[in-house]
Image (cartoon, grey):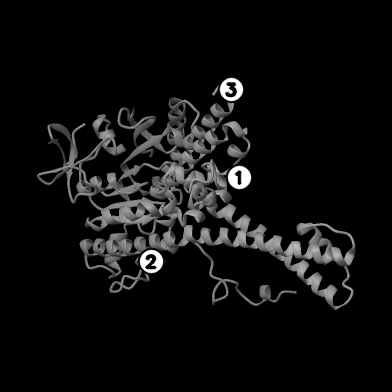
């Protein structure tokens, strides 16, 4: 899978890494205007590193669920088009606001991703839906937010096994999540995110017609 | 009997506005010059997304796409800033007030109950104590002026006791929202107490585990620091089953383990807000190990 426009592999102190161009966020290395995109700190970064069929070309409209303090969404906004960032907890949203304030087309929303009707009057249909929410029922959240995705759009979903069931075998959790997800999505690719993120699965999917 | 049902449509006027999804964009009704949009962004809903930029341009809210996104940016940034500031200001400090008020009510109820017990004992002959005795006193038919005073005092005890119970119920509902991880491990009331003793969730998140372990035992700690006493093993966390229910020999270890996890929980709650059930599982394991230790240690 090739890299989206606006994402490059650059060398940081002799080490090659993904990078995007944009205002620095939290002390990440910057070389010639390119900021290091650390897959250890970003599940989407890890999906790209793992070669999943992410389908990102650059310039897309994006809805990002579970933006947290904005580390990943800052990189996505660097290469994507208008980006809507949903986060539920006030604390990380404070950092997210700082990230958004430095960017022209990143819109922070203090909303609950389990209640899409509370932001459907703000968010337009998008080509890419990214989801990284650490709550139970991650597949249900993706299904509820399918309404935002254009018919040929892509879902990039990071599944955290422990959010579903701390004690269960992660593979069993992933099977169950994917099965639930299949009621509304066709899964195009999936892969574990180790060594960047333990017990996480990356899923690429498109809405079932 | 109600005339409301006969008096025409219940929708409309200022009587009752039904909440329904309107599928109107956030910008409809917002002044494009002031962009005072917080109510619209936070309060309104829609069932489905729509091509809001096009709709906004058609309706004259924005001149073109770039102008729409500029306005959306200003409105969402301002809304998120205000909402975050408000929620942060509100939450943990409200909890601090609630837990202090609950303690005041309990303490005052107990003090007054003692007075009622002493006074009531001298008049009724039988004696008792605490809130149950105050209930007995209040239930009696008062006999004379002083007896009425005594009954009224007993009723105050009951009211204060009920207020404390209701405050506790509110704290139990509210703490998991403010500090979900801390609350699930400590229980909501102890979690609220730790936040109150530190002065706020931020202060608690910045405390060391050793400080959290002895929060509420400041007197004993200062006595120890002056060289007059052994170091306290636990403060208010003593009320937790994992400390109180561990045999005295291993109680110090249990208190240390509990304080360590509670500190982590407070940090996750303050800095990320994400739920981390594994913290609780790790704590359970750790306590089990401590309790299973033999006497050889």
Please tell me which of labels 3 and 1 falls first in the chain.
1
- Answer left or right for A105 relative to B21: left
- The structure residue drawn at horizontal position 44% and vertical position 63%, both measured from the top left corner, is B43
Q: Which mark is residue B70?
A: none
Q: Which residue is mark 3?
A: B294
Instruction: Report how far apart the C-alphas of labels 3 and 1 lie in the structure.
Output: 24 Å
B183 up-or-down from B13: above or below: above
Q: Which comes sooner in the sequence, label 1 or label 2?
A: 2
A21 vs B96, nearest the viewer: B96
Residue labelled with disc 2? B38
Quarter of the N terminus of chain A within the rendering: top left
Q: Is residue A34 above or below residue B133?
A: above
Pointer 1 with pointer 2, Cβ within 8 A: no
Q: Position of residue A165 (x, y in %)?
A: 49, 33
Tag 3, which chain?
B
Q: Are marks 1 and 2 on the same chain?
A: yes
Report the Cα–Cα distance between label 3 and label 2: 61 Å
Q: Nearer the viewer, mark 3 or mark 2?
A: 3
Q: Is residue A41 left or right of residue A147?
A: left
Q: Chain of mark 2?
A: B
Task: Give how far across and how far down residue B29 sits, in percent.
Answer: 37, 71
Residue at 81% in and 67% down: B119
Residue tagged by mark 1? B239
- Which residue sits at x=37%, y=32%? A200
Other residues around mark 2 within 10 Å, as few (<14) / some (14–19) / many (≥20): some
């Amino acid at each position: 899978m090739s890299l989206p426009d606006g994402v490059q592999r650059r060398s940081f102190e002799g080490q090659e890494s993904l990078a995007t161009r944009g205002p620095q966020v939290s002390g990440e290395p910057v070389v010639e205007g390119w900021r290091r995109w650390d897959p250890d700190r970003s599940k989407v970064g890890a999906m790209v590193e793992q070669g999943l069929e992410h389908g990102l070309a650059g310039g897309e409209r994006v809805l990002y669920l579970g933006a947290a303090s904005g580390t990943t969404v800052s990189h996505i906004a660097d290469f994507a088009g208008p980006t809507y960032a949903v986060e539920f907890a006030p604390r990380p949203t404070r950092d997210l606001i700082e990230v958004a304030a430095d960017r022209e087309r990143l819109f922070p929303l203090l909303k609950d991703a389990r209640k899409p009707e509370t932001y459907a009057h703000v968010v337009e249909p998008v080509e890419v839906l990214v989801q990284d929410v650490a709550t139970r029922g991650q597949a249900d959240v993706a299904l509820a937010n399918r309404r935002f995705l254009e018919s040929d759009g892509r879902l990039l979903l990071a599944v955290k096994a422990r959010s579903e069931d701390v004690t269960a075998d992660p593979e069993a959790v992933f099977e169950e999540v994917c099965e639930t997800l299949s009621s509304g999505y066709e899964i195009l690719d999936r892969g574990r995110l180790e060594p960047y993120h333990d017990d996480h699965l990356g899923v690429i999917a498109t809405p079932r017609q | 009997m109600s005339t409301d049902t006969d008096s025409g449509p219940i929708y409309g006027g200022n009587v009752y506005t039904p909440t329904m999804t309107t599928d109107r964009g956030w910008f409809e009704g917002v002044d494009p010059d002031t962009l005072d949009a917080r109510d619209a962004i936070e309060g309104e809903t829609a069932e489905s997304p729509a091509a809001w930029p096009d709709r906004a341009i058609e309706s004259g809210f924005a001149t073109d796409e770039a102008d729409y996104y500029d306005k959306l940016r200003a409105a969402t940034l301002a809304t998120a800033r205000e909402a975050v500031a408000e929620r942060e200001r509100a939450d943990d400090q409200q909890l601090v007030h609630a837990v202090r008020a609950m303690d005041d009510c309990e303490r005052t109820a107990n003090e007054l109950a003692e007075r009622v017990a002493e006074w009531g004992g001298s008049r009724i002959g039988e004696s008792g104590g605490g809130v149950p005795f105050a209930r007995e006193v209040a239930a009696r038919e008062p006999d004379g002026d002083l007896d009425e005073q005594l009954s009224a005092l007993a009723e105050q005890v009951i009211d204060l006791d009920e207020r404390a119970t209701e405050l506790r119920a509110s704290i139990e509902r509210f703490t998991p929202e403010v500090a979900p991880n801390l609350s699930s491990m400590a229980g909501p009331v102890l979690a609220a107490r730790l936040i109150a003793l530190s002065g706020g969730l931020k202060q608690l998140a910045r405390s060391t585990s050793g400080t959290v372990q002895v929060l509420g035992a400041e007197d004993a700690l200062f006595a120890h620091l002056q060289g007059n006493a052994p170091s306290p093993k636990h403060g208010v966390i003593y009320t937790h089953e994992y400390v109180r229910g561990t045999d005295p020999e291993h109680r110090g270890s249990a208190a240390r383990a509990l304080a360590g996890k509670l500190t982590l929980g407070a940090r996750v709650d303050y800095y990320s807000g994400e739920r981390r059930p594994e913290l609780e599982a790790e704590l359970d394991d750790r306590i089990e190990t401590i309790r299973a230790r033999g006497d050889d240690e």
